[in-house]
Amino acid sequence: MKSQRAELVADTAIALLADRGMRGLTHRAVDEAAGLPPGSTSNLARTRSALLELTLARLTQLESAAFAPILESPAQDLVEDLAEMTAQALWTQLTVGRRRTVARYELALEATRRPELRRIYDRAGARFRDPAVAILSAAGSSDPVRHGRQIVAFSEGVMFDAVIGAGAEPTLDDLRLGIGELLRGMLGREGA
């Protein structure tokens, strides 16, 4: 983020998306919710598209921080450590980061209708998929590109089901078990 004001506007937009949905996100609503003088958000992000792009950039920054332990730290036991780190990151997204997760789903749907936002959303997604491919390659995956996509898709599905779906919310132990089983299956390490 370029400035504290940009972070405030983006953080407020994230909260509005989670609370009110895409229709509730306006420049005026951000100004009011952030306690800014009228026109402040428009001065920072002139168009709706610019506001959405600013919001998605901040959301990506926050989610990257939540997943940093997985993406940046070497694991001793790749399967178990990766399962634990992924479970912890997903748990964060489902608890303290729940509103961010809801806001991201709002932006994901909007990206299906806005090519300029789709490009940004796709680049943001690569920040998670590319390291997953590298980690799974290091763990001995026979097809790290496919497996990387699958671990990200599995994680997205778990979050979507827990936050938006009608399923029961998983416990941290459920997440550990599910991710561990998926990784062991991908890597051919049954029972390991």
Image: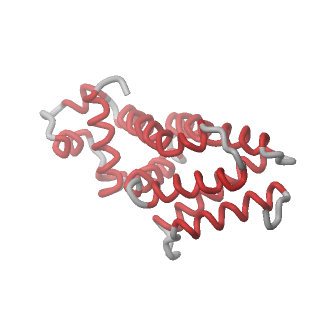
In the rendered image, which quarter is residue 119 located in? top right
The C terminus is located in which quarter? bottom right
| Tag count | 0
Determine whether 15 is above or below 45 in the image.
Answer: below
Residue found at x 82% / y 48%: 141
The N terminus is located in which quarter? top left
Of the pair 186 and 42, the residue shown nearer to us: 186
Of the pair 29 and 1, the residue shown nearer to us: 1
Residue found at x 58% / y 65%: 175
Q: Is residue 83 left or right of residue 173?
A: right
Residue found at x 30% / y 57%: 20
Picture coordinates of residue 5, whole percent (x, y)? 25, 29
Picture coordinates of residue 180, whole percent (x, y)? 69, 61
Residue found at x 59% / y 44%: 70
Of the pair 4 and 173, the residue shown nearer to us: 173
Q: Is residue 151 left or right of residue 188?
A: left
Determine whether 105 is above or below 119 in the image.
Answer: below
Picture coordinates of residue 135, whole percent (x, y)? 71, 42
Q: How is the image coloured?
A: secondary structure
Q: Is residue 35 left or right of residue 81?
A: left
Picture coordinates of residue 136, whole percent (x, y)? 75, 45
Determine whether 117 is above or below 104 in the image.
Answer: above
Determine whether 166 is above or below 91 in the image.
Answer: below
